[in-house]
Amino acid sequence: MRTIKFRGKTLQGEWVYGCYLIREEKSPVVETSASYTIHYIVDYADFNRLNENEILLETLGQFTGVYDIRDKEIYEGDIVTDSDEIVETQYVVRYCDGGFVICEILNGDIEEALSRDIYESPDSDKIYSIGTFCEGWKGENYLQVVGNVYEHKLKTN
């Protein structure tokens, strides 16, 4: 059985993990009556109390079901390295067409790796299924989580 869970960063800047919920709200100002969407992560351990943690949508990432070489969970949006190679190669974890892939970061350009078309790109040969990469043709998992795209963007801005 696979574990389905998410992570996101709260408005206070803390990472939270658990079930992802979306709720539509109506504006408390009667004149506007505009609706808006709030995104939450509810901790599985605290599910009965529904301790909802509002998150920034741009930080939402799903657990891939794969662990890195240090037994750390790998999430969508993580930056990972392949520690098996002599030259360190970095990848970004993406969700694409119903599965998780890792896209090689070329020339340090994370945005390009996030948006690269997996079918049309001349660099499509630098995109791998995370499950195949970790458990298949390499025979052993050499990936190590070194960061994530959300915190990287904060450092570069």
Image (cartoon, grey):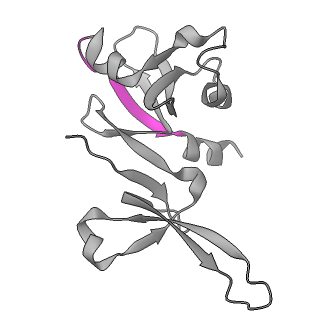
Residue that appears at 62% across and 17% down:
106
Q: Is residue 147 magenta?
A: yes
Image quadrant of residue 37? bottom right
Image quadrant of residue 43? bottom left
Boundaries of the magenta span: 139-148
Q: Is residue 56 magenta?
A: no
Our reading of the magenta stretch's main secondary structure is: strand
Is 44 positioned to the left or the right of 98 in the image? left
Is 89 positioned to the left or the right of 120 in the image? left
**Residue closest to the eye, 12 or 114:** 114
Looking at the image, is 131 positioned above or below residue 43? above
**Residue closest to the eye, 83 or 129:** 129
Is 7 positioned to the left or the right of 152 in the image? left
Residue that appears at 33% across and 23% down:
131
Residue 119 x/y as whole percent: 60, 15
Residue 28 x/y as whole percent: 67, 89
Looking at the image, is 16 positioned above or below residue 61? below
